[in-house]
Amino acid sequence: MKDTPLSNCERQFLLKTIEERKRLDGRETYDYRNIKITFGVDYGFCMVDLGKTKVMSQVSCELATPKETRPSEGMLFTTVELSPMASPAFEANKQSELLVKLNRQLERCLRTSKCFDMESLCIVSGEKVWRINVDVHVLNHDGNLMDAVSIVAITSLSHFRRPEVSIQGQEFTVHTAEERDPIPLSIYHMPISVSFAFFQQGSYLLVDPNDSEEKVMEGLLVIAMNKHREICFIQSSGGIMLLKKQVTRCSDIASVKVLEITELIQKALEKDRKARKDDDKFSFAESLPKEQITAQKLKEAPLEKMDIQETASEIINKANISPSTQGEHSPVLHAGGVGQVGEGITSSWGLEEDIEEEGEMEEKTTVKKTKRKGDVIVISDSEEEDIVVLN
Amino acid sequence: MFASFKDKIGEAVLPGDVFTLELPSPENKAKAEKLICGPGLRRDGDNVSVCKCGVLRHKPPNVFWIDSQQKRYVPVKGEAVIGIVTAKSGDIFKVDVGGSELASLSYLAFEGATKRNRPNVQVGDLVFGQFLIANKDMEPELVCIDSCGRANGMGVFGEGGLLFRVSLGLVRRLLVPQSELLAELSALFPCELVVGLNGRVWVKAASTQHTLILANLLQSAENMTAKQRQQLFRKVADGAL
Amino acid sequence: MDVNEHEVSPATREFGCEQNLLSRPDGSATFIQGNTNVLAGVYGPAEVKVSKEIYDRATLEVLIQPKIGLPGVRERAREQCVRETCEAALLSSLHPRSSLSLILQEVHDDGSLLACCLNAACMALMDAGLPMSCLFCGITCVISTEGQIITDPTLQQEKESRAQMTFAIDSIEKRVMMSSTKGSISVQELQEAIALSQRASERIFQFYRDSVHRRYSKIQ
């Protein structure tokens, strides 16, 4: 499927509004869209809504053998999936340019920036370490996927708990969540990316571009930063020439945005922690928007089970299949490795003679075989068996 | 005959709902009434069954249809739509109308166009046209002239203005004769408005600011009651004027 | 309600749904059964690849995305179940040579995942306004080791069960459109489970109806 093409009219209007320092959705130049963070039942699950862009992420862990070059370090794998749900232009299991870019950028954002303690993930040096997998799914594409992906990934990593491991010498035991409380990863800092779209050879810039703005932009600058104003990665694409001044200005804006977003993530995490502590059972149904008419809920309820058994018996009686009528067709074994039920219909194409001959031959072999084996009929296709039959 | 319909008018119905027609006895055939099933209704033997979810509508004496809020457009003959020209190939333009196939538009199907005098249409331009051919088995064909060869408001869009998408239900509400929504909107700012039945709306007001406000109002009017909408419009009128 | 009572008596968990929550797809819905949550998106009728074109009906593609890792055989099998159910309900001959794609994303699996996929699929198809001859819903039943039938089981109940059945049931005559079973079941148990699922389906269809009523409540 193809995406709806962008018309000249939209392009011109967008550029005109940007020149007038306005945006289609009423935001100011440096405004981010609304960010909504939702957690799930599992540890390490997170869903982020950035305006209409929607992404979700699940962190999971497994035991693995470490790399030879880094025997005492855990491993981190990030996968971004562009679900065909997100846009008609996305195809399932296709390595598109955008996907490769997102994957690479997220990897740089999390792994290369050393945002959490990899060494604490080591169980037995050189033998067993934890491998942390971050699976990010893009569910709805309305621009600025990179920022949404980076927020969801770091939030779910901060939310994640891994099972505790106790080590005695070379032996280790992994405790289930019931035995011992799972432990969080030790996160050093939270890298969050902020995207800037450039228009008209860099004379105009917008923070957090949406889909239509991304379609008309000339260049994109992505800066990932943590709240200590340390740049974790920086990427400029679209081949636009930027002045030094512009880049520093962007990093200034990014630092403000990162602070805001980090605070939001911390708040969301804190709220979730509290809810879990109070044993306030999370439910997806509770997280549905209540005022919206597109959402609906129904409480759990028992079902009337009164006459179910009678109905079932009735149906069976009606069908009236006596067990004795079944089972008439016992398997007939014509040759080794062949099981057959029933005789089939003989062909009437004038080749009957040949077929009969074959049939006789088959019968003979069957006789031979049953004699040898007595009552036991084994259907097997091992080579040895075949040789026996041919004799 | 339409008794089973009558008490459901204005209510939401779901696919699989069945209306039974109390057919008159074969003797008095002369009195048999006709029933016209609009979108979302299908004849199924002596019954009429619903195949789309939405609100049952009735237009006296005998027209019934389902009004649904969908996003995807399916071309229907005679409907006026806004298309985006995606390619020029020989004598025809390929136009994206939001359906499952690109529609074709002949360069002769413009007012005053001849083989010598071709209309000035570029790839990416917007056109407002109506379907000459639209059925499930054929490629849809657009024309920008009416049966008399007049443009009648159709053709290529001029400079400026904003194109945006709303649901098909909202578009139909805008196009209802004496639409409240349209009246309220035009009371707000003077504007040019082109509404395509494929869910695309083009608006142009005196300034970009006004155009933006109108577009945002229309998009948000989707899930509002008349009262909420009027409140919002009043707020905008107070704030902006 | 008493927890124990819930464990033994056949019941349905809390339901929740939201339609039209994604801006890009033509139809979208999320369906919640207890803690099981599936998100569905539908595109179509849209352009179809020439290789997949069918001359007299629409091509339906169903994709199930697991939460962790890549889709495997289990997802393929589920896709097949959902696709066959949807094909039976959709009037795909009304949109020949076009493609309908249904994408289901597992958000959380706490039992009855296939049933939840079916319900989310039906809601999304309704939201997309595709022509359907009837609605359908999915119900999972498990038979506990004591021989008790439990409808809409949790993951724990599924694990402790002896057999598991999932049915798709149509809204008109409550007939079974699709069944997928695991484990050994006696004829009596199967019939009981079907009868129970039919009973539970009424509740789901009523839930569909209530959601649609609510959704169209503001359109005069």
Image (cartoon, coloured by chain):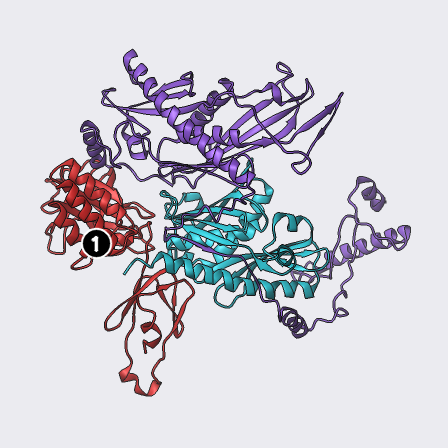
Identity of the residue furthest to the top in this view: A244
In-front residue for pair A189/A198? A189
Relative horizontal placement of residue B116, taking residue B233 as reference (left or right):
left
Residue B114 occupies quadrant:
top left
Which lettered chain is shown in red? B
In-front residue for pair A52/A340? A52
Q: Is residue B107 visible?
A: no
In-front residue for pair B152/A19? A19
Question: Which residue is rendered at x = 73% and y = 59% of the image?
Answer: A341
Q: Is residue B52 above or below residue B6?
A: above
Q: Is residue B102 visible?
A: yes
Chain C: its colour in the image is: cyan
Question: Which residue is rendered at x = 51% and y = 64% of the image?
Answer: C202
Q: Is residue C84 above or below residue C171?
A: above
**Secondary element type, mark 1:** helix
Q: Quadrant of the C terminus of chain B?
A: top left
Q: Position of residue B160 (x, y in %)?
A: 15, 36
Q: Quadrant of the N terminus of chain B?
A: bottom left
Q: Which residue is mark 1?
A: B174
Q: Amino acid at mark 1?
A: Leu
Chain A: its colour in the image is: purple
Q: Position of residue B83 (x, y in %)?
A: 23, 44
Q: Position of residue B158 (x, y in %)?
A: 13, 39
* Chain at tag 1: B
Relative horizontal placement of residue B188, taking residue B62 as reference (left or right):
left
Please tell me how crowded label 1 is: few (under 14), some (14-19), or many (20+) other residues with Cα within 10 Å: some
Question: Which residue is rendered at x = 26% and y = 72% of the image?
Answer: B62
Question: Which residue is rendered at x = 60% and y = 42% of the image?
Answer: C73
Q: Position of residue C13 (x, y in %)?
A: 55, 55
